[in-house]
Image: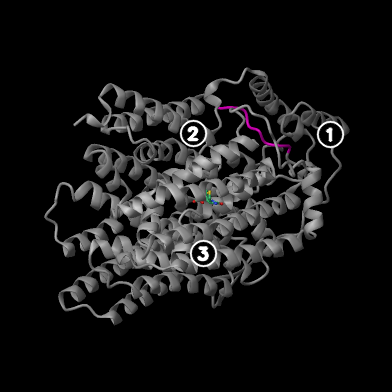
Amino acid sequence: RIRAAAEKALLGLEVCCFICCCCLFWLWQIGHGYRRRSIWIIILMMMILIVQMMLMSQRLLLLRRCSSSALSGFDTGVLHSSGGPRGLVVAWVEPPALPPRLPMPASTAAAIGKLPALGLPPLPLAPSPSSNVTSESTFTSMLLFSLTIMATVVFHWLDYLIFALVLLISASIGIAYHRQRSSKDIFLGSRQMTLMPVTFSVMASFISAISILGTTAEVYQSGVQYIILGISYFLAFPITAEVYMPVLYRNRVLTAQHYLELRFSSAVRTAASIVFCIQMFFYQAVVLYASAITFQQVTGLSFPLTMVLTGVVCTFYTALGGIKAVMWTDLVQMIIVFVAFCTLVVMATMEVGGFERVFEMAAAGDRLNFFNFNPDPTVRHSFWTLLFGGTGMCLTIYSANQAQLQRYLSCSTESVARRAIYLQMPLTFLFLCFLCLAGLVIYAFYSDCDPLLSGDIVKRDQLLPALVVRLFSARPGVTGLFVSCIFSASLSTVSSGINSLSSVVLEDLIKPWQPNLTERAAGWAARVLAVVLGLSTVGIGFLATNLPATVLQIVLSLFGIVGGPLLAVFSLGILVPWCNRYGALTGLLASLATTLGFSIAALIDPPPPDHRVFGTEGCYNGTDASNYTISTEHYSNWTVTTASLVARQRPVHWLSYLYYTPLALLVAMATGLAVSALTGFNRAK
Ligand SMILES: O=C(O)CCCC[C@@H]1SC[C@@H]2NC(=O)N[C@@H]21
């Protein structure tokens, strides 16, 4: 313990010294004429520091595991130590396997067998030390959980190499584009961007660890019907390309909100900018959180460290290179994500017995449920909610979000922007198909023992990393590939988010009050803002540890609750020529109040989960049959509550979260038109 504390203190000291040196060096460089070589020195120092942090953090965790097993009286393994290249600890050897599983008592099996017939999820396993952690779902439990698995997962040098290469590529592109001077360069790449980077950047900006972890978890727990969302792409993207994008492009604005000032008033612009900032802040935080939990699970690095690492790397290249760096790194990162993820899915499919076996298991577990035509709007996912709600959700992302609109505005011509939207459409759909396949592979692997119920993981979002660790931890390079994929997906999203946030804060919130800001000063302000906003996002990311649902559902709800009203105000501007500034402002606020009201009501009185049955028969360790009795008692309360929820008349606030955007559109249109009529339509001054 003393050694661990000393190592920690040393690491802290090292990080502080490094940051101070970098700042001093940077200031000195600015004072003495900037030289490109100096950046490489900083990058090199950073790489050394990162590798050092990784090695030290692993050593710390092994030390901690060693001391905690000694303290708890369990002597579960043997720690082999030597002065090998990895530092203090070289290997952790597990004790002999537990005695074979005993058959489950017949009475217990019968009781458990009846549960699915009642439409209820199966029995959770007996409370074990790890499943106690499951129920906590707090930041502390995440840390505890990480401690239990960290020592068993050892990142091979090849994994580190792959990962370091990915980091190096992103950072170098940032450096290559560091010469952006004005805010127009930094935010719109001087309006010279070409088809390829724009296409991949449009795709990458909203495909992060959230889509990867969340979609796979969604398919695992509720089946493949989520793929219907892909059909909504074929509605939403053409609408974006033909209706929303041209209006914004032709107005030659620097931010999307600027259009709202031209069309309505500065008050509408300011209100919309604040709403956008709130949305993006929380979104970025969840993206960082999602990649950090994967990172922690696979590499063994601590959760706070991975949060800071992700945040710092993308803040660095965003602040340095502006949108050009962001878009070119997006291109590289998206290629890495695509290739790495598809390779992994195919490899995992082979590991679990091939495509046929995956689909067989999925069919047996009722996961091949493509079509649910139930028109009830309170059904979380049905064909209709996914199609219409999904179209609305995609429109909030692709038609009314500065992060995307910035990409269209940076194109050399309108036709490039339009072609980019159409080109990324099939690619995004293809990626969704791979995500759904990955969800089915997870199901095939865990169909007889749900890892959440068995206490192997603490959140559903950890299903995919858990599978990768189980299947590939012995194969050098594969886990590195997976982490690089998650990391690249998140870097591209967070960097786009930081760049768009700083553009909105500078152009829509600061410049109207400081109109005399010179171009050079604005360029520097943009960089400082990127650093401040990037680091603040890391701070907020720590709050994301207590989320009540999967990261995907949380973020898609956020897009509906906050992005829906934003889409509504753009739609009022573009589609409703009679709407005036009063109508637009009231429409925005009324729709925001409505979506917020619905979501708060759903949080207070949540709908019952619509998950399918999870397998547990394979998890029974059989050492103590009385565990089941304890669980049955514990479970009966839950059963009664859930059964009463299922039987209850479904209230309106159980509205599917995917319908928040259509709801916002309806409310904004109605109030916007009514208020415009009352205030004399466009005659109002
Ligand atoms: O991944 C994220 O950061 C947020 C989720 C955004 C969902 C959109 S819908 C279109 C595109 N396809 C996906 O699979 N994810 C994004």
Percent across and percent down for residue 232 are 57, 45
Q: CA distance from mark 2 to mark 3?
A: 30 Å
Q: Secondary structure at mark 2?
A: helix
Q: Residue at x 19, y 73 (%)?
A: 30
Q: Residue at x 67, y 51 (%)?
A: 439
Asked which secondary structure carries label 1, the reply is helix
Q: Are marks 1 and 3 in contact (CB under 8 Å)?
A: no
Q: Which residue is mark 3?
A: 334
User: Is there any visible trace of residue 496 in the rendered image?
Assistant: yes
Q: Residues within 10 Å of mark 3 (few under 14, many from 20)?
A: many
From mark 2 to mark 1, how far is it between C-alphas?
A: 46 Å
**2 or 3: mark nearer the eye:** 2
Residue 16 visible somewhere in the drawing: no
**Disc 3 residue: CB within 8 Å of ligand 1:** no
Q: Amino acid at mark 2?
A: Pro
Q: What is the quadrant of residue 375 in the picture?
A: top right
Q: Position of residue 313 (x, y in %)?
A: 39, 64
Q: Is residue 122 left or right of residue 458?
A: right
Q: Which mark is residue 662?
A: 2
Q: Amino acid at mark 1?
A: Ala
Q: Left or right: where does residue 212 sit relative to residue 634?
A: left
Q: Residue at x 70, y 52 (%)?
A: 442
Identify the image quadrant of residue 194.
bottom left
Vertical position of residue 240 compared to residue 134: above or below: below
Magenta stretch prevailing secondary structure = loop
Mark 1–mark 3 distance (CA, rounded to whole Å): 47 Å
Going from the N terminus, do you reach mark 2 or mark 1 first?
1
Residue 425: name its quadrant. Answer: bottom right
Return the mark for residue 109: 1
- In the image, which residues are magenta? 606-613
